[in-house]
Image (cartoon, rainbow, N blue to C red):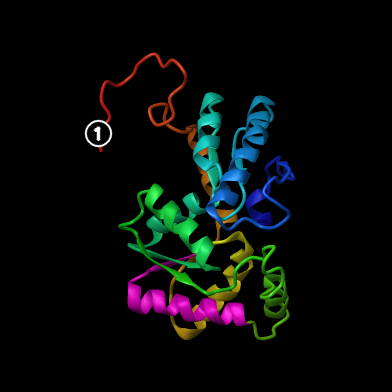
Amino acid sequence: MKPFLEGIDWDLHPGAPSTHGNWPVQSKWEFMSVGYNRQAVVREACASGKYNAIVLLGGGDPGYFESREIGRQYRIPVTSCAHAQMHMAGLLGNKFGIVDIGETHNMQMYHLVVQYRMTDRCASIRNINYPLPSPNFPNDKPIEVERDRALNGAQSGMLDAAVTESIAAIEEDGAEVIVLGCSAAYWMQPLLQKKLAEIGWDVPVLEGYRCALGVAKSLVDLGVDASGLAFPGERPAKWRRRKVF
């Protein structure tokens, strides 16, 4: 992310204390817990007057819509990884394929595709089956080991699976852009991009951090934030009698 932060005065918040447990989020209730906990952090950052954009890290976008509602009160754009990736992918191709880590997390991504109205743009969600650790399975497929192997030039089963599923998304599902679903897999972006290019597939591979930063910078440069109709205040000056789909 370093090149994307050049010339920007930025802070990295360590995040709200975890209340679901000391393990990464995968299930919907874990995402809900984290999403709720981060709202106070977002409100504090907006109220501080120090920032003109908020970027939420993490691939499953916990609390994103609620954070946008808070940001709108302060006229501050809020961006997140999956939302930014999907919209960025729409600028690059007709359909995108999501390559994701595990079954439970897949369904969070599925939920986001529906919520973000991307069902016509998402070709598929492909599972490489390297889920995050949990209390019941603390260390059966350690992603950090796969990452270190790949970065050191050794064979990584996780990266190999990502290549296989990316090719399947392209050949079988019609994907023209590849999106990495979980932030625990974002390290694969340059490696996956390179391997697909070596095979002959000229396809963009996106990860969420740079996409969320890029969208935040664009919104700041354009001088816009979320619509006051999509995220109305408590007593808007104008209100609509009817909402249609």
Residue at the extreme front: 136
Q: Is residue 15 visible?
A: yes
Q: Which residues are magenta?
A: 157-179
Q: Is residue 7 above or below residue 222?
A: below
Q: Is residue 195 above or below residue 75?
A: below
Q: Which residue is mark 1?
A: 244
Q: Nearer the viewer, residue 37 or 97?
A: 37
Is-magenta flag for residue 13? Answer: no
Residue 158 on image: x %, y %:
60, 77
Q: Residues within 10 Å of mark 1 (few under 14, many from 20)?
A: few
Residue 107 on image: x %, y %:
46, 60
Q: Nearer the viewer, residue 98 or 20?
A: 20
Q: Secondary structure at mark 1?
A: loop
- Left or right of 92, for residue 140: right
Q: Main secondary structure of the magenta part?
A: helix
Q: Residue at x 52, y 63 (%)?
A: 104
Q: Is residue 206 visible?
A: no
